[in-house]
Image (cartoon, rainbow, N blue to C red):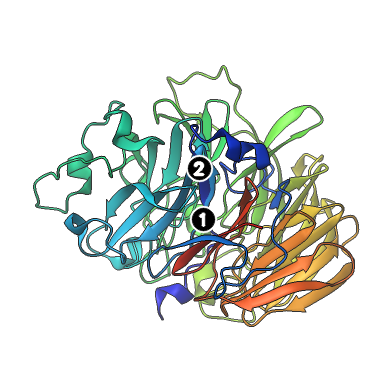
């Protein structure tokens, strides 16, 4: 089976704006992290976004740039720059001919290349780093620092300004980093990324990468929280990273490991830990929310800012909620390819909203059962809240890897039954569902009283947000859409498998 039918990623785009163009900021705000800060809600406060557009005539089209051939990433935007993962099919630098993962840093004004990160493939088993797939993880940006999980399962801290202000940081081996095994280091140019530090998850944690990593790094204070994407081996029957954690925290200044989970996720991982964490404050306590690869939703204590960096800490669990308690818990890989029975997993991010967690969960998209749900969980409880923690549950049509978008009491979520659903956030009552051409691995974005969403059938939809279904526009783009739209500074960004569109009224 081809990888594009095996990698579920609700991926994102990063947009960045030049500080020398302050007029851009007057129209809105940057989008330096996937989803609403900390809570992960897929909403944006941007206004003046297009209700329709036309690629052929150029109506409401600011610019369009190629992003390779297998793009699963969404954009993020900060300080005049747009950051998005891609593969190397467009060959922007002839020194790097061949298959690579790349992170593109584009000019927000016209989409031109500012710099790019070149990441050679992991040699050996292709299941550790699937061929021709770009960097799937959306970066997280703070000031002039870019944090991203690469296709080689490395967390990198990059300089947003690239090499334009010199080769900064303790990492000085960019030439070696870009070179293939057995080659001499390449010359570092102004078009290359500036790596400040690197943390190798494979080397440091002994994890097993699978297909391609997807993690949106959550930044809170001095800490970077992320899922490690530890997964099964090429046989899909077990992981070689049995003792590797699925959730960690790093010091953003040094890349040092500060904390990790001790939940023994390894034997309970059906495919991979692709769900990124969220955060929220409950009764004055800051909590870290993580949908484990075992189908269980967890809440941990967020790290205290004064915690010692000299040792590695264990996350302290507050509560856990089994999203599918009747599912098998032992010998789970014997259910591989069973579409009616098996364990549940989560790939979309949990969203914290009004002391509740909203999460999609169900069978694995590629190898598991078709049953799936949108769960609403009480985040104020403690202990094992499997009995009593569920507020409501809404059945979805087949699988879902969607991160919910919650706006004005309504939840918008997609599934692999070709639907975009509108559901009451308070009680789980459905209001409407719109059919798309194909299944959707993406999440919907709510912005400017509109719902923006695409599917793997190349179709993109603009709907009016609200309890009544109203289609504002629908059109077919160049290729399938696997990522989530992003809005920043009055511009809507849509990423397909081949292109990144910047749309503006």
Label of residue 380 in the image: none
Residue at point 57% right, 73% down?
57
- Vertical comparison of 47 with 132: above or below: above
Name the quadrant of the N terminus. bottom left
- Vertical comparison of 415 with 220: above or below: below
Residue linked to disc 1: 273
> How far is the residue under mark 1 from the one under mark 2?
28 Å
Give whichever of 504, 248 is nearer the camera.
Answer: 504
- Vertical comparison of 291 with 16: above or below: below
- Vertical comparison of 335 with 59: above or below: below
Give the mark nearer the N terminus: 1 vs 2.
Answer: 2
Residue at point 77% right, 39% down?
382
Q: Quadrant of residue 425?
A: bottom right
Q: Position of residue 369 (x, y in %)?
A: 62, 77
Q: Kindly state the secondary structure of the residue where label 2 is placed.
A: strand
Residue 38 appears in the rendering = no
Residue at point 67% right, 44% down?
36
Describe residue 5's horizontal placement relative to residue 401 as left or right. left
Residue linked to disc 2: 16
Residue at point 64% right, 43% down?
278
Describe residue 460's horizontal placement relative to residue 76 as left or right. right
Describe residue 247's horizontal placement relative to residue 286 as left or right. left
Give whichever of 499, 418 is nearer the camera.
Answer: 499
């Amino acid at each position: 089976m081809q990888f594009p039918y095996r990698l579920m990623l609700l991926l994102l785009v990063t947009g960045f704006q030049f500080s020398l163009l302050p007029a851009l900021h007057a129209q809105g705000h940057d989008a330096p992290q996937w989803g609403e800060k900390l809570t992960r809600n897929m909403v944006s406060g941007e206004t003046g976004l297009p209700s329709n557009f036309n690629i052929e005539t150029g109506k409401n089209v600011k610019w369009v740039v190629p992003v390779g051939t297998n793009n699963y990433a969404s954009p993020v935007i900060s300080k005049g720059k747009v950051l998005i993962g891609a593969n190397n099919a467009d060959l922007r630098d002839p020194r790097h001919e061949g298959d690579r993962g790349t992170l593109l840093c584009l000019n927000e004004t016209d989409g031109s290349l500012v710099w790019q990160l070149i990441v050679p493939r992991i040699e050996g088993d292709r299941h550790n780093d699937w061929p021709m797939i770009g960097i799937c993880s959306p970066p997280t940006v703070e000031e002039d620092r870019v944090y991203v999980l690469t296709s080689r399962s490395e967390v990198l801290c990059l300089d947003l300004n690239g090499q334009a202000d010199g080769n900064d940081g303790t990492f000085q081996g960019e030439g070696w980093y870009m070179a293939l095994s057995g080659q001499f280091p390449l010359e570092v140019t102004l078009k290359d990324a500036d790596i400040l530090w690197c943390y190798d998850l494979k080397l440091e944690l002994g994890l097993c990468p699978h297909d391609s990593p997807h993690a949106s790094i959550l930044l809170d204070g001095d800490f970077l929280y992320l899922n490690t994407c530890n997964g099964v081996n090429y046989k899909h029957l077990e992981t070689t990273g049995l003792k590797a954690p699925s959730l960690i925290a790093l010091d953003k200044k040094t890349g040092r490991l500060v904390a990790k989970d001790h939940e023994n996720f390894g034997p309970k991982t059906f495919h991979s830990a692709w769900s990124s964490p969220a955060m929220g404050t409950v009764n004055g306590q800051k909590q870290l929310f993580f949908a484990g690869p075992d189908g269980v939703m967890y809440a941990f204590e967020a790290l205290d800012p004064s915690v010692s960096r000299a040792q590695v800490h264990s996350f302290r669990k507050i509560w856990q909620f089994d999203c599918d308690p009747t599912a098998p818990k032992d010998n789970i890989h014997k259910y591989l390819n069973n579409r009616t029975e098996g364990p549940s997993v989560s790939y979309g991010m949990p969203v914290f909203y009004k002391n509740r967690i909203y999460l999609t969960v169900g069978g694995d998209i590629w190898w598991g059962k078709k049953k799936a749900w949108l769960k609403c969980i009480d985040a104020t409880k403690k202990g094992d809240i499997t009995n009593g923690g569920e507020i409501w549950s809404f059945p979805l049509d087949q699988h879902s890897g969607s991160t919910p978008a919650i706006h004005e009491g309504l939840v918008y979520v997609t599934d692999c039954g070709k639907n975009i659903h509108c559901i009451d956030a308070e009680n789980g009552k459905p209001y409407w569902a719109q059919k798309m051409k194909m299944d959707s691995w993406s999440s919907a974005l709510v912005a400017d009283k509109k719902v923006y969403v695409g599917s793997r059938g190349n179709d993109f939809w603009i709907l009016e947000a609200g309890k009544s279904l109203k289609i504002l526009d629908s059109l077919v783009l160049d290729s399938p859409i696997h990522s989530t739209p992003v809005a920043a500074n009055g511009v809507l960004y849509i990423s397909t498998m081949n292109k990144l569109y910047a749309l503006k009224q």
